[in-house]
Image: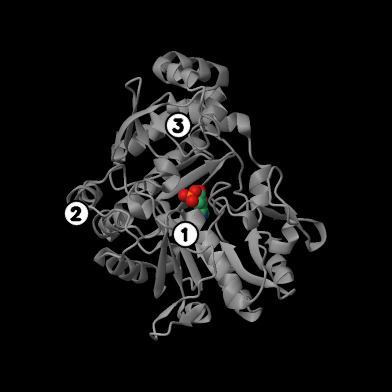
C-alpha cells in the first residue's frame, strides 16, 4: 500500500520532483525535507499559502493541518498581521534598530493577561527563549542542571536531549551530537507521568529548573495524568528548583495556553512560533521572584537583567516581530478563534474515533485543545518512552502519504492535526473521509 501511495505521489508532483533534483547545492535542509521520510524521496515545493490552505508548485491545494508544526496556528498570512507588518516594514521602517516600540509594552501586557507572568523578554524563536531562560534559571538558583523528560523536545537546546538511564543516571538521547560535556553535568532526566522519578532527580538538589511542556507534544501527544502537573509544582518548590513551562505547542489548549486553562503556576514561561503569525518571534516570562534574583540596579537606579552574556540578540524584540505579535494576538488568535478551533479539533477527534470503531482498529487519539493526534496503539502511551516504543514508521508513512495524496497535510513528525482560525468544518470532514478510506484500504 505504501509503495502504491508513493507511486501516486511521484506521478502527481513532477514539478516538485524536478526542483528537488535540481537543488544540488542545498545541504542540511531540515526541516524543509521532512516529507522525504515518507514521500519516497522529495518534498512538496510550496507555491503559496493562505489561511488553512497550501498550494504547491504542481498546482495542488491542500488543507493544511500541519500549520508549520504550530508556527502557523494563526493561519497563513492573516490579514491583520500582513497589515501590521507592512505598516512597520514599508511605511514606518526601522524593522531592526535595537530600539523599543510602543508595541513592546502592548505585547508584554497581553502576554501577562494570557499567561500570568509579570515580566517578559523577547527572542526570535522558542529555541532561543529556552536557551536564554535556562541561563537565567541557573543564575537565579546558583544550580547547574536542568531536569527534562525523556522524549520531550524544546528546540536545539543542548541540555534537553537526554533520557533517564538505569539507576537514576542521565544519558544522551541516541544520535545527539552533544558538546563535549557529559550530559549528566548539565541535565537530569525523568520519566513523564512518574513523579517518583522526578523526586529522585530533585533530591540531589542540583536542579535549577524543571523544563517541561504541560503535555508532551513532540512524541505525539502524551497528556499529563491528573495531579502530575500539580505534583511537579509541589516538588519544584519543595526541592528549590524552578518550574519552567514551554507552551510553544500547548498554546493550542486555549487562549491562555494550558497554564491558564489548567491553572498552572510556572516560575518561567516560554513560547514561540505561532504568536508572530508567521514572523520570527519568541518570548519568555519570569515571575517577580525569578526576575528579582537576576536583576541588577544600574547607577541611575534602573532595574535590568544582569548581563550574563548569551542572553538576548541583535534581532530579539525587533519592531517587525513586535508588530506581528501585537496584530496576531490582538486580532487573530482571539478567545473566539480558540473556541472555534477547539470545537473543530473535537470534530476531528470524533471523525477518527468513528473509523477506528467501524474497522476495529486498536489505535488511540488524544486531543489537546485545538490539536489532535492519533497513534497506532491503544491505550494511549503514558510516557515518552512508551510512545517512542510504540512508533510504527511504516504505518506512519502510509497514513501521512495517504492523507497527502487526498489533499491533506498532517504535522510532519506525527499524525497530528492542528486547527487555525481559517479551518472549516468541511476541512475536518474531508480528513474524516480520507482517513476512513485509508484505514478501509488497510483492512481490505
Ligand atoms: N519548544 C517546543 C515545545 C517545541 O516543540 C519546539 C519546536 O518544535 C521548540 C520549543 C523550538 O521551536 P523553534 O524550532 O521554532 O525554535
Please name the residue that numbered disc 1 is placed on. Answer: 247
Tell me the distance, in whole angstroms, between the alpha carbons under discs 1 and 3: 29 Å
Specify the farthest residue to the front. 299
x and y percent of residue 102 in the render? 25, 67
Secondary element at tag 2 = helix
The reply to whether discs 2 and 1 touch (Cβ–Cβ < 8 Å) is: no
Pointer 3: residues within 10 angstroms few (<14), some, or many (20+)? many
Of the pair 92 and 120, the residue shown nearer to us: 92
Which residue appears at 53% of the width and 51% of the height? 217
Left or right: residue 419 versus residue 231 is left
Residue 214 visible in image: no
Of the pair 83 and 250, the residue shown nearer to us: 83
Specify the farthest residue to the left. 91
Left or right: residue 108 versus residue 200 is left
Secondary element at tag 1 = loop
Which residue appears at 42% of the width and 85% of the height? 299
Tell me the distance, in whole angstroms, between the alpha carbons under discs 2 and 1: 32 Å
Closer to the chain start, of discs 2 and 1, is 2
Which residue appears at 65% of the width and 52% of the height? 161
Please name the residue that numbered disc 2 is placed on. Answer: 92
- Quadrant in which residue 236 is drawn: bottom right
Residue 398 visible in image: yes
Please name the residue that numbered disc 3 is placed on. Answer: 435
Q: Is mark 1 within 8 Å of ligand 1?
A: yes
Which residue appears at 35% of the width and 34% of the height? 63
Pointer 2: residues within 10 angstroms few (<14), some, or many (20+)? few
Closer to the chain start, of discs 1 and 3, is 1
Closer to the chain start, of discs 3 and 2, is 2
x and y percent of residue 122 in the render? 40, 62
Of the pair 281 and 91, the residue shown nearer to us: 91
Pointer 1: residues within 10 angstroms few (<14), some, or many (20+)? many
- Quadrant in which residue 190 is drawn: bottom right
Amino acid at each position: 500500500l505504501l509503495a502504491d501511495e508513493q507511486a501516486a505521489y511521484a506521478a502527481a508532483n513532477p514539478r516538485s520532483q524536478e526542483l528537488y533534483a535540481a537543488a544540488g547545492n542545498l545541504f542540511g535542509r531540515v526541516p524543509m525535507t521532512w516529507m522525504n521520510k515518507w514521500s519516497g524521496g522529495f518534498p512538496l515545493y510550496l507555491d503559496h499559502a493562505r489561511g488553512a490552505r497550501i498550494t504547491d508548485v504542481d498546482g495542488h491545494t491542500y488543507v493544511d493541518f500541519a500549520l508549520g508544526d504550530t508556527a502557523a496556528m494563526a493561519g497563513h498570512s492573516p490579514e491583520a498581521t500582513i497589515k501590521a507588518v507592512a505598516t512597520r516594514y514599508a511605511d514606518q521602517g526601522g524593522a531592526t534598530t535595537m530600539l523599543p516600540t510602543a508595541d513592546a509594552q502592548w505585547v508584554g501586557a497581553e502576554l501577562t493577561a494570557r499567561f500570568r507572568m509579570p515580566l517578559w523578554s523577547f527572542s526570535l524563536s522558542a529555541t532561543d527563549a529556552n536557551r536564554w531562560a535556562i541561563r537565567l534559571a541557573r543564575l537565579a538558583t546558583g544550580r547547574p542542571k536542568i531536569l527534562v523528560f525523556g522524549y520531550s523536545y524544546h528546540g536545539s537546546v543542548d541540555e534537553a536531549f537526554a533520557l533517564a538511564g538505569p539507576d537514576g543516571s542521565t544519558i544522551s538521547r541516541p544520535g545527539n551530537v552533544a558538546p563535549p560535556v557529559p550530559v549528566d553535568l548539565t541535565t537530569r532526566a525523568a520519566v513523564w507521568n512518574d513523579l517518583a522519578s522526578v523526586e529522585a532527580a530533585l533530591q540531589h538538589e542540583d536542579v535549577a529548573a524543571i523544563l517541561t511542556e504541560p503535555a508532551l507534544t513532540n512524541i505525539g501527544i502524551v497528556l499529563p495524568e491528573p495531579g502530575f502537573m500539580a505534583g511537579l509544582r509541589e516538588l519544584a518548590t519543595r526541592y528549590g528548583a524552578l518550574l519552567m513551562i514551554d507552551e510553544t505547542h500547548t498554546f493550542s489548549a486555549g487562549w491562555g495556553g494550558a497554564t491558564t486553562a489548567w491553572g498552572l503556576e510556572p516560575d518561567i514561561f516560554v513560547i514561540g512560533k505561532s504568536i508572530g503569525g508567521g514572523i520570527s518571534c519568541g518570548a519568555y516570562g519570569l515571575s517577580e521572584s525569578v526576575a528579582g534574583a537576576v536583576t541588577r540596579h544600574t547607577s541611575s537606579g534602573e532595574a535590568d537583567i544582569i548581563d550574563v552574556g548569551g542572553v538576548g540578540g541583535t534581532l530579539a524584540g525587533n519592531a517587525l516581530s513586535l508588530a506581528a505579535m501585537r496584530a496576531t494576538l490582538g486580532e487573530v488568535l482571539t478567545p473566539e478563534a480558540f473556541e472555534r478551533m477547539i470545537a473543530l479539533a473535537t470534530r476531528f477527534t470524533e471523525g477518527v474515533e468513528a473509523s477506528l470503531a467501524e474497522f476495529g482498529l486498536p489505535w488511540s487519539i488524544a486531543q489537546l485543545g485545538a490539536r489532535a493526534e492519533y497513534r497506532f496503539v491503544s491505550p494511549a502511551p503514558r510516557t515518552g518512552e512508551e510512545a517512542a516504543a510504540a512508533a510504527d514508521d511504516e504505518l506512519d508513512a502510509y497514513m501521512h502519504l495517504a492523507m497527502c495524496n487526498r489533499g491533506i497535510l498532517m504535522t510532519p513528525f506525527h499524525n497530528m492535526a492542528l486547527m487555525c482560525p481559517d479551518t472549516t468544518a468541511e476541512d475536518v470532514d474531508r480528513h474524516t473521509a480520507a482517513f476512513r478510506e485509508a484505514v478501509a484500504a488497510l483492512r481490505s
